[in-house]
Image (cartoon, grey):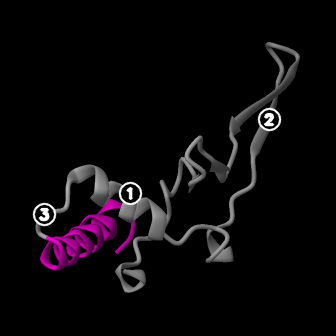
Amino acid sequence: MNGTSAAAPTVSGAVALAYQAKPDMTVSQLRYLLAKTARNDTAMPTLALTALERYDDFCGEKVIFDYGWQDNAAGFRFANWYGFGVADAGLW
């Protein structure tokens, strides 16, 4: 089991634990908690992604299709393949 088939129940369970511990938590606080505690490529090197570049014959230049892991404006790491990473309710 992988992909959204595994991610949906995992994140749902983590959210249920968070709401059980703090029932007055807002959606914004929950999203922050999930993003802050997710394991990404720095915690799990097996999630490492490199930028995907290809030469485009039509344009005559190199094109980057995916940048791999990046830091967003809030300082959280994210990837197009993994979002913020693997949910880890054990860090709460």
Q: Is residue 6 above or below residue 64?
A: below
- Residue 62, by quadrant, is top right
Q: Are marks 1 and 2 in contact (CB under 8 Å)?
A: no
- Disc 2 target residue: 54
Q: What amino acid is found at the position of numbered circle 2 in the picture?
A: Arg
The residue depicted at 29 percent of the width and 50 percent of the height is 28
* Between discs 3 and 2, the one toward the N terminus: 3
Mark 1 / mark 3, whichever is N-terminal: 3
Q: Nearer the viewer, residue 82 or 39?
A: 39
**Which quadrant of the figure has residue 11?**
bottom left
- Left or right for 80, reference 67: left
Residue 10 to residue 56: above or below = below
In x, y percent, where is residue 12? 21, 68
For discs 1 and 2, the disc positioned in front in the rendered view: 1
| Residue beneath the point at 75% across and 34% down | 64
> Which label lies toward us, 1 or 3?
3
Q: What distance separates the C-alpha of mark 1 from that of mark 2?
A: 34 Å
Whether residue 8 is in magenta: the answer is: yes
Quadrant of the drawing holding the N terminus: bottom left
Judging by the rendered image, the residue that carries numbered circle 1 is 32
x and y percentages locating residue 56 in the rendered image: 80, 23
Q: Nearer the viewer, mark 3 or mark 2?
A: 3
What secondary structure is found at the residue carrying circle 1?
A: helix
Q: Which residue extends farthest right? A: 60
Q: Is residue 5 covered in magenta?
A: yes
The amino acid type, in three-letter code, at marker 3 is: Asp
Q: Report the residue marked by disc 3.
A: 24
Is 60 on the left or on the right of 45, as rendered? right
- Mark 1 Cα shell of 10 Å, populated few (<14), some (14-19), many (≥20): few
Label 3, label 2: how far apart the Cα atoms are: 48 Å
Start-end of magenta stretch: 1-22
Q: Residue at x 60, y 51 (%)?
A: 75
